[in-house]
Image (cartoon, rainbow, N blue to C red):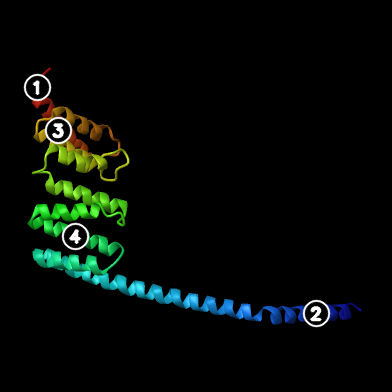
Amino acid sequence: MADIFREVDEDIRRDKAAEFWSKYQNWIIVFAVVIVLATGGYRYWDYQRRIAAEEAGAKFEAALQFSQQGKKEEAEAAFGALARSSEGGYAVLARLRAAAEAGSQKSEEGVKLFEAIGADATVDKNFRDLARLRAAILAIDTASLEDSRKRLEPLAGADGVYRHTARELLALAAFRVEDYDMASKWLDNIIIDAQSPGSVRQRATTLQALVAAGKPAK
């Protein structure tokens, strides 16, 4: 008797499955095709992305070779071409290197290129901040204290990735024009920051002594 009921139950399930297939087979087939196409499309896109990354990496290495060989103009041109023709990380790195190569020949040109990267909202914030820092470094010898402050103070906050270098540069810029109060302020920020690298803190302590020696007594 149990076998009869089991056979009836199986017949009912087969009938329901056949009815379900008859009703929804077109949708099931379309869904399966979409999955296959999507999977194939993703794999093709991933393959093309890897090929592009490998090509960009090779071009970046070739540009580095120019730089290491002292061929500054060729290196700048190679990095610039890579920045224009690629996307993602290599494009940003190429722009940074092109700016550095330009700055090694003419600081004003390097400053302009670094500031353009720093103002580009499509670039990752850490790279933008690095570009602003590099611009400030190139300009530090000729910029006024006010110009240096405009470039460096936004980088010198408590959460700034490059705050230690920015603070040190601000102190040096102030010290150069004998603004000892401002120099002392930024040096104190370095010294009391527990995350300041030891070498930076040591230089800050030394410069603080020079500030104290040069500061007129009240």
Image quadrant where residue 177 sits: top left
Above or below, comparing residue 35 to residue 199 in the picture: below
The answer to whether mark 4 and mark 1 are in CB contact below 8 A is no
Amino acid type of disc 2?
Glu
- The residue that mark 3 highlights is 206
- The residue that mark 1 highlights is 216
Residue 163 vs residue 73: left or right? right
Q: Secondary structure at mark 3?
A: helix
Amino acid type of disc 4?
Arg
Q: Tell me the CA gap for discs 3 and 4.
A: 33 Å
Task: Looking at the image, tell me whether mark 1 or mark 2 is earlier in sequence order.
Answer: 2
Amino acid type of disc 3?
Thr
Residue occupying the point 25% across, 45% down:
162
Q: Residues within 10 Å of mark 3 (few under 14, many from 20)?
A: few
Q: Secondary structure at mark 4?
A: helix
Q: Secondary structure at mark 2?
A: helix
